[in-house]
Amino acid sequence: MTVLSRREWLLSDRPASRRQARLGQVYRTWLGFRSNWLAMVGLAIVLTLILVAAFADVIAPYDPVVGGDLRTERFLPPFTDGHILGTDDLSRDIFSRIVHGSRLTLMVVVLVAVIATPIGLLVGTTAGYFGRWVDVTLMRITDIFLAFPRLILALAFVAALGPGIENAIIAIAITSWPPYARLARAETLTIRDSDFINAARLQGASSARILWGHITPLCLSSVIIRVTLDMAGIILTAAGLGFLGLGAQPPQPEWGAMIAAGRRFLIDQWWVATMPGIAIFIVSLGFNLLGDGLRDVLDPKARK
Amino acid sequence: MSDTTANGGRESALLRFLWKTVKLLATVALTFLGLLLATFLIGRVVPVDPVLAVIGDRAPQSVYDRVYVELGLDRPLYEQFWLYLEKVFTGDFGQSFLTKRDIVDDIRRVFPATLELATVAILIGTLFGIPLGVWAAVRQGRFADQFVRVFGLIGYSAPIFWLGLLGLLVFYARLHWVAGPGRIDIAYEYSITAKTGLLLLDSAMQGEWDAFKNVFSHIILPASLLGYFSMAYISRMTRSFMLNELAQEYVTTARVKGVPEWRIIWVHALGNAAVPLVTVVALSYANLLEGSVLTETVFAWPGLGQYLTNSLQNADMNAVLGGTLVIGAIFVGLNLLSDLLYNLLDPRVRRHA
Amino acid sequence: MSALLTVDDLRITFPTRQGPSEVVRGVTFTLGRERLGIVGESGSGKSQTGRAILGLTPAPGKATAKVLDFDGTDLRAATPAMWRKLRGTRMSMVMQDPKFSLNPVMTIGKQLLEALKFGAGETRAEATARALAMLEAVQIRDPERVFRAYPHELSGGMGQRAMIAMMLVTEPDLLIADEPTSALDVTVQVEVLRILDRLVRERGMGLIFISHDLRLVSSFCDRVLVMYAGRVVEELKASELKQARHPYTRGLMNCLPQIEGGVRPLPTLERDAAWAR
């Protein structure tokens, strides 16, 4: 047998092992994804966000919280020496604040995903697996959460819990899980009665074991894709809460709160409110492009 | 033979429709109860003392105790919930700590502003969104398609409050094309009497065209912004529904018959896509309520959204919960409406309803 | 017999990831005012051949031919406007399943009128009368009711009759019937076929009958083309089916169950890679 190039090995019609088949599948998906330049732009933006958040201390030239000289360095317009995006009312470098703010944004996205995904999975798989009244009860609760517009419900929760970034994250997570539960339930219903589940049941596996060992892993991938698609929405909701003064509190460099703070100087010092908005816009556009590309590749029906 | 099957089909379709409606209404009732429970529970967790909210913090202990009992706070939680239900159903959401008025009155006062804004926005979103989506589907994979897609994605990605601020900066402060924050200039405020509360309608009915122009120049910017967001969603859904319909066999039939292409697109395919599109438009209308909270804050628009945020910032819990409840109820109502419309528009059910 | 339709070297290609794939590869035949059957298994290119004649090859597919001539019109160079004049009025097609081929949110009457309104200039009342007469001609007992009905209110057989009415109401010269009875119950199939047969014969139109059912085609058509993997492997008179020479045709014939003297084991269709070449 001749030695195949790695590419040929991956694209083979007749994979010799399960691993080759799976890797080939991943590679083909990647090829499809790569040919969509908009999705690649999205991926680049998200990777940049992660890198900027990781190396914020190195990248940011100034301290994000402590400003410079209040007499000489307030409201410096963009591109004045050393302040590429200008300074705000407290003489803080806007670029440095945005760079550090990327950490908060990333934290919100990750924590919401980490909290909401398991809740959604647990509720959805349980409802789907047990059916009957468990299903009815859990899905009714899910519907009630879905009955509120997300931001409004998050507002009510933050109002109850008190403002702050942690509470904002909890509120967003609480309002994010219902769609995942719906999805996980639908997936569970399609596999609940398949033979391998019955086989596990006959061997005496407990319900909990079947749920976590067999069903949840199968629902995981579609739920994760759905979470990725939602990330832009999460960022926008967090920014909205920040803008209303219910998210991160000053002097934290949260982008939405920065826009709110810059609002007072909008007419004369436009850059104070504009710059953080551009950051939010780019990052959520990145997540949207990425999610859109992922959906195109993984869901051939939607691509057409 | 064919006659009997058709009649049988008709009866069962009618039964199905009725059953569906009953189920739908039961679901809505349950959801609404859930809504009430949610707002009730949020109201109990909140660190604000409801008694102090009523009497202020200087009242003597005896007054405090009396009000504590009056508010039913000494009773078990389920009894309190029952009390809450009774109050809500008699239209009593309590008093606003901030305005010292009944919350129902407050909401009645601010609601037309939001309704007007959302209605103009959904008109803009639908009038532009559907043709754009159709255009993208017909030109699938070509420039038009990519353009509509990116245009929509930008709508999905920009924070609405930020776009609002930029819009004010550019179109109001710099270019003077539109009027600034608020619904109407003070100069015109007393030239129209509020009948419907919808200023565009009121001023037009009373022939106050100067006032109408002023109101229009106030509403156009926030409504366009909100409309842009629903347009992004509507155009995307229109595109996907149209792609689905254009691939159907009946489209080929129409082509075989020699029907012109415009008619195939706008009558045959869109006629079928319209059925699910109604749901999409109703849902966008509901989502505008969410967008309005942020937009109204930016544009100082005296509507429900601003009322809600104002109350939030002043820890006026009764008002917050009342507002949330109203918005939730409207949301549920619009969902119900879209379901009913769906059933009405689909001839498979319509003929027998 | 003058040729109504001449097809020479028709080729249809679809781009795929592995490069272009030809699904119809050099199909050639002529058709007069007669009934021609095209038989083949699914994927043999028979349906695509029918659609290409109407200029309805679905994108991104492309159809090319040396000659594609319909009654003196070169179809290869037809503009959209010319197609609209030809389709419906002079050539039309009955499709497989009325559940999908009729617009679900439009009444039968409206869809019928649409075929007429754009074909000939006449008043609405005249057109309605013609449409009702056509519904009667396909043996619908209560034409007024069907005229007002939505497709889902009709049974499969009724739907297909309405479809046939819709396609014949303009009295075209050529009708393509693409598996017109495959989606119907067996009991209704014969009835619908009989109606189709009578109308085609009365009006003296050319018919291309596409089916996978060799026996049905041979009992119903004058001539039969047998297609395999995008090619015509054999062309014969329906009456001379027994003298088929190509092994694929013979294989198809042997697969038909016989009432007397059954063969055991049941024969399966043998394929030879050489046929596809």
Image (tube, rainbow, N blue to C red):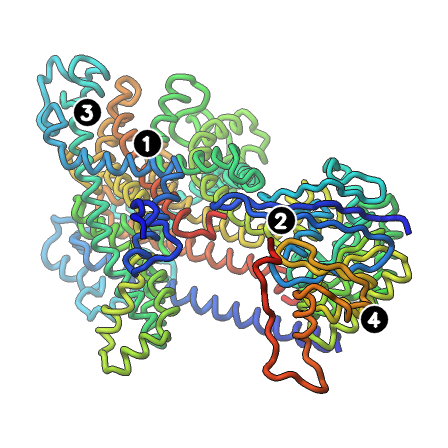
C-alpha gap between disc 3 and disc 2: 51 Å
Give C235 or A153, whichever is nearer the viewer: C235
Q: Identity of the amino acid at label 3?
A: Ile
Determine the residue located farthest toward the bottom in the rendered image: C260
Which label lies toward us, 1 or 3? 3
Find disc 4 in the rendering and name its residue. C141
Report if the CB atoms under discs 1 and 3 are less than 8 Å apart.
no
Q: Which structural element holds mark 3?
A: helix
What's the amino acid at mark 2? Ala
Q: A34 left or right of B269?
A: left
Numbered marks: total: 4
Q: Nearer the viewer, mark 1 or mark 2?
A: 2
Residue at which label 3 appears: A94
Give the spatial CA distance, label 1 vs label 3. Answer: 16 Å
Within 10 Å of the Cα at label 1, are there few (<14), some (14-19), or many (20+) other Cα atoms?
A: many
- Secondary structure type for disc 4: loop
Locate residue C65, reporting x and y percent. 70, 42
- Report which residue position mark 2 lands on: B269
Tell me which amino acid carries mark 4.
Answer: Arg
Tell me the kind of residue under disc 1: Trp
Between B82 and A27, the one lying in front of the other is: A27
First in residue order: circle 1 vs circle 2: 1
Residue B141 got which mark?
none
Chain for mark 2?
B
Left or right: residue A78 versus residue A65 is right
**Badge 4: residue crowd in 10 Å (few <14, some 14–19, many ≥20):** few
Which percent across, then down, holds residue B322? 33, 53
Same-chain check, marks 1 and 3: no
The residue depicted at 11 percent of the width and 14 percent of the height is A71
Q: Residue at x 39, y 67 (%)?
A: B30
